[in-house]
Image: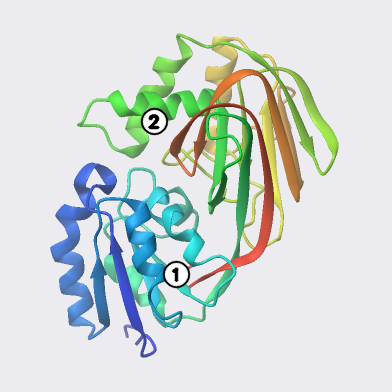
Amino acid sequence: MTPIPPARSYAVVLNPSAGRGLAGREWPRLEAELLARGLSFEVISEASGAAALARVEALPTQTAVLAVGGDGTVGALLPALVGTARLLGIIPLGSGNDFAGMLGLRPGDFAGALDRLAFSPRRVDALRATILSGEGEGRTHLLLNGLGMGFDAEVAALTLGAPARLSGFGRYAWAALAALRNLALTPVTVEVDGQVLYSGPSALAAVMNGTRYGGGFQISPASDARDGLLHALASGPVSRAGLLALMGRVLRGRHLGHPRVHHAPGRMVTVTWARPTHLHLDGDLAGRVTAVHAEVLPGAVTLLNG
């Protein structure tokens, strides 16, 4: 029997461009599923994340949010969710859907995502990242999944030019191979809770709340979004062949413990690069920076279908 969700009003925040237009194309099918279940909802569809956020912030806090899109769609709404009583449900229809994928939510499985609205809400952690130096210096961002710097952010930039026929994972793999051709190691220092985790040449660094990025790469298999900890990772010096081999391990989540991988859990992380390096925040590019600080916000978001 399909569970019956409690009586709530919902704001369905639709990013029609998510997943290269997938969310917009799939909206009629999702709308039919919502109507068939008799759910009370209004639709918020705006041209920018900032405009969608403003509309959500103006709603009564008892109105639950259903974010329809990818990690970026959810991330844009976090200022209206973190530290509040507002409930969040995720309907994954983006390019990567990594946080949703960690939760077991599958793109297009509307019945599965909506069935979970009947379950007890659960709190999950979030991250607060501040750019200390570089483009966007001084800006603070809220994240649900995580951030990456170096190689993986370069890959995120290259996915914009990936062949349209490829899926989220396929686009990431295509871009990763392209990025390998221009691999450049940069000195980095990663500090976790005030202690140096690694200092030296590196291809990439990541700070994660979730377990995966890039449409399925298990970059942080030890992460638990409910344990009040973040996880910092950094590569040591690697060749192109060595990084390609590591990517194969990351895909399966078997890279922790590798001598070229440095990893530690903690509550605060500072990453400092010797030269400007690409940064992505929940998969969205944020320019080139030289230093970022991140901290965990335990239990900051209440998930309806997590």
Is residue 168 shown above or below 184? below
- Mark 2 neighbour class, 10 Å CA radius: few under 14, some 14 to 19, many 20 or more: many
**Residue 146 found in image quarter:** top right
**Residue 77 found in image quarter:** bottom left
Point out the residue furthest to the front here. Answer: 138
Is residue 244 shown above or below 12? above
Tell me what residue is drawn at x 26 percent, y 32 percent: 166
- Mark 1 neighbour class, 10 Å CA radius: few under 14, some 14 to 19, many 20 or more: many
Tell me what residue is drawn at x 15 percent, y 53 percent: 25
Residue 39 position within the rendered picture, expressed as x and y whole percent measured from the top left: 26, 83
Residue 30 position within the rendered picture, expressed as x and y whole percent measured from the top left: 21, 67
Residue 208 visible in this rendered orientation of the protein: no
Residue 260 position within the rendered picture, expressed as x and y whole percent measured from the top left: 71, 22
Left or right of 234: which side holds 84? left
Tell me what residue is drawn at x 26 percent, y 78 percent: 41
CB of mark 1 within 8 Å of CB of mark 2? no
Tell me what residue is drawn at x 28 percent, y 25 percent: 162
Closer to the N terminus: mark 1 or mark 2? 1
Rendered image: mark on residue 88: 1
Q: Name the one closer to the observer, 45 or 112.
A: 45
Q: Nearer the viewer, mark 1 or mark 2?
A: 1
Point out the residue furthest to the bottom here. Answer: 7
- Name the residue that disc number 2 marks: 172
The amino acid type of the residue labelled 2 equals: Tyr
The amino acid type of the residue labelled 1 equals: Leu
Q: Name the one closer to the observer, 55 or 20.
A: 55
- In what element is the residue under mark 2? helix
- In what element is the residue under mark 1? strand
Residue 149 visible in this rendered orientation of the protein: yes
Tell me the colour scheme of the image: rainbow
Residue 194 position within the rendered picture, expressed as x and y whole percent measured from the top left: 85, 40
